[in-house]
Image (cartoon, rainbow, N blue to C red):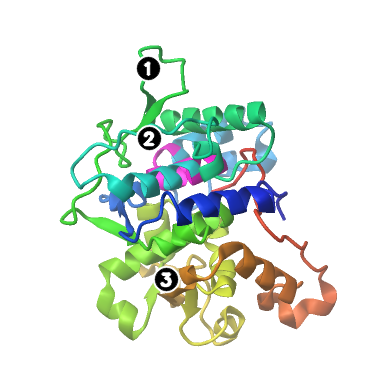
Amino acid sequence: MQALTASTGRLDTALKLYRTKFRHHHGVAIRTGFLRLDDGRDFPRDPDPARSPFRASEHQHVLRDAVREDVGSRPPLTVLSRRGELALRLHLTALYVASKDTKPGRRFNSQIKNADGTDSWANLAAVDGQYDQRRRLIVRAVQRLSAVQLAEPRSADPGRWDRWRLIDETQRGTPYLVPHPSEPVLVVPSLFFLNGWHLVLRPREIVTLLMLADLARRHPSDHAETGVGAPNTTRRRYYGVTPEVYEAHNELEEFGFLELQGGSVHAARRAGRVEAGVADDHREGRAQMEALRFNVVWDAAREDASRTVRKALLSHPVPPRFDEWSTKREPRAKEPVGRHAETDGESV
């Protein structure tokens, strides 16, 4: 388990700001281009032996270049979340704040400072530490946003990041404008932010939740009747989500955001259904297996994030999916609040 990022006090400070000065109930419209590629992307279906980490010394730079190429072809959300945990929290925070008073089609011009004042970005993103450390962390996060074309400095000096602004979240390089309802958007309930879920969930959990929510938006009838599934080709080609990241659906089930159709994941495995990605394409001579199907439950956002996560982790020292082997496994670390480290390192 990861180290903590935000103390309970920092998280409480952030939530107080959301529930008072920054409170709104519009929902946050996120352009779907932020999390999904319209035309998909090509990716290798069969591993190249030269790209194996175990043979990295034999093929200098091949693995590094291959990973860089693969990550660079993903949609902005998964690119950002791979090595930008705080940057993702800051970006989602900025989208929430932008949707409060800025009308659709208008540019969000923030007067919020990085670390100065009560309503700073550092406080809104629940960044822990002393003033100088918090300021440095926010600057680094903004620089990370800039590196993936999601933010730019407002100063004429490109090296100054004390004032910055959002760029369109689909990486078009144009100024960020609050989306019109007519645009293809995924609307995230305001309670997701008011109750701190964007500050507590890890990047892979946010990526998986938004992917499944987008699939539910695209296939409402399927979602209502049988739930939505994410086969490996869909996840990899359109969302840039790897099998390791998709495992976050287990935690999202525990926290109440997902309901698996047909019982538990382990029961699904025993019934002959495996997690999407094991095999899913007849055209390549692979057995077709049914993808797990979920209902997305946004009502879970009504609960306080830190309390819900604390309760889930303390109630199940061994994750429920490992109950059958619980006597053979070490309990997972207790992880009460925050769950993040203010460093980059999420593997997406």
Indicate which disc residue 150 carries: 2
Amino acid found under the numbered disc labelled 1: Ser
Q: Which residue is mark 1?
A: 155
Amino acid found under the numbered disc labelled 2: Leu
| Marked residue nearer the N-terminal end (2 or 1) | 2
Q: Is residue 97 above or below residue 254?
A: above
Highlighted range, magenta: 72-89
Residue lying at 68% horizontally and 72% vertically, measured from the top left: 311
Answer yes or no: do the residues labelled 2 and 1 have beta carbons within 8 Å? no
Q: Secondary structure at mark 3?
A: helix
Res. 42 in view: no
Q: CA distance from mark 2 to mark 1?
A: 16 Å
Q: Is residue 312 left or right of residue 15?
A: right
Residue 177 belongs to magenta span: no
Q: Secondary structure at mark 1?
A: loop
Q: Which residue is mark 3?
A: 298
Mark 2 nearby-residue class (10 Å; few <14, some 14–19, many ≥20): many
